[in-house]
């Protein structure tokens, strides 16, 4: 069983932590509740932090003459400057964090599908991003970021967790020996994100004579690689690469069932851990010492994605 380092996540405080939404409610998220056993949180509610009470009249993002403002239509209060000041202070104070989970569609924390109003904030307009959410995306484009709504989707949740625990492990690298170990055990997992990127990272290690600069150069490329969404086809490619270690040792029914599980995963019916668990059983059965050390087979704590949804 793999031992996981606890990632540090910035979390919207209204999600499972405090009744601080505009109407005094709190958002229930079974996933975040379970994640608290495996991660640490820095919770934040930008609206409360700038002095808005609970409950409070809702705030809206309004577009006036091409400029975005954050206003409270009921009172006419403009909190744009206060929000920007808080954002600069809070995000500037963050040091070693590994990811963000923010409230969806919030005018402060939302990262997509946030209503932007016209004029005085009463006529619906286009969709945009919340002030805090946008700032997070701009300042930390390399870190895993999702909203709690999208994390209900099985594949989105898996992709977030894969990147989150990779980032946390890279943050623990302190020397060139650690870097080699990190790359070696994550080789197939990195292949599942970007085969080309995994090769480039390998060359960085092989060709770098200045070990101090190796970590910096490796990290810069690593963070560029994980910015892109993980494509199911690339994860399947890594699964099939591992499957090649055993294909000559399995009977026809075993091969057929594994390939069916791959297809179920491709269609989003089952999580990645289903074909991974099958591969893991063959790693143990055939004593493949190389694959035994690969994080691909347990990229995040298994409890965080329910395999009971399947079959």
Image (cartoon, rainbow, N blue to C red):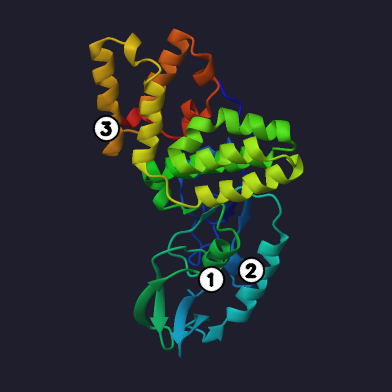
Considering every residue shown, the one lying at the far bottom of the view is 65
Residues tagged 1 and 2 counted as in contact (Cβ below 8 A)? yes
Q: How many marks?
A: 3
> What residue would you read off at disc 1?
131
Q: Nearer the viewer, residue 267 or 294?
A: 294
**Which of the two labelled residues, at mark 3 and mark 1, occupies the earlier sequence position?**
1
Q: Which mark is residue 87?
A: 2
Quadrant containing the C terminus is top left
Judge the density around disc 3: few (<14), some (14-19), many (≥20) Cα neighbours within 10 Å: some
Q: Position of residue 113 (x, y in %)?
A: 39, 66
Q: Position of residue 21 (x, y in %)?
A: 51, 63
Which label lies toward us, 3 or 1?
Answer: 3
Q: Position of residue 243 (x, y in %)?
A: 37, 22
> What residue would you read off at disc 3?
264
**In this picture, residue 126 sits left or right of residue 147:** left
Q: Compute the Cα span from label 1 to label 2.
A: 8 Å
Name above or below for residue 72 compared with residue 210: below
């Amino acid at each position: 069983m793999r031992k996981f380092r606890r990632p540090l996540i910035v979390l919207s405080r209204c999600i499972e932590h405090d009744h601080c939404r505009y109407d005094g409610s709190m958002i229930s998220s079974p996933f975040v509740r379970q994640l608290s056993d495996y991660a640490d949180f820095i919770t934040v509610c930008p609206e409360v932090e700038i002095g808005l009470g609970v409950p409070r009249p809702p705030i809206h993002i309004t577009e006036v003459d091409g400029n975005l403002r954050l206003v409270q239509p009921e009172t006419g209060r403009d909190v744009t400057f206060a929000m920007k000041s808080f954002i600069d202070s809070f995000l500037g104070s963050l040091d070693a964090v590994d990811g963000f989970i923010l409230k969806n569609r919030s005018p402060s924390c939302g990262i997509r599908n946030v209503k932007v109003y016209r004029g005085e904030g009463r006529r619906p307009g286009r969709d945009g991003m919340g002030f805090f959410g946008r700032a997070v995306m701009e300042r930390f484009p390399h870190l895993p970021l999702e909203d709690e709504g999208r994390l209900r989707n099985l594949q989105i949740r898996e992709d977030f967790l894969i990147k989150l625990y990779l980032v946390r492990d890279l943050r623990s690298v302190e020397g060139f020996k650690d870097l080699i170990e990190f790359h070696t055990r994550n080789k197939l997992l990195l292949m599942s994100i970007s085969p080309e990127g995994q090769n480039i990272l390998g060359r960085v290690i092989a060709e770098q004579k200045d070990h101090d600069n190796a970590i910096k150069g490796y990290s810069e490329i690593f963070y560029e690689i994980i910015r892109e969404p993980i494509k199911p086809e690339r994860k399947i490619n890594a699964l099939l690469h591992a499957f090649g270690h055993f294909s000559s040792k399995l009977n026809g029914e075993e091969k057929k069932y594994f390939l069916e599980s791959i297809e179920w995963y491709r269609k989003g019916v089952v999580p990645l851990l289903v074909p991974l668990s099958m591969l893991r059983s063959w790693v143990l059965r055939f004593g493949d010492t190389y694959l035994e050390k690969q994080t691909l087979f347990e990229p995040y704590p298994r409890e965080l994605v329910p395999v009971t949804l399947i079959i």
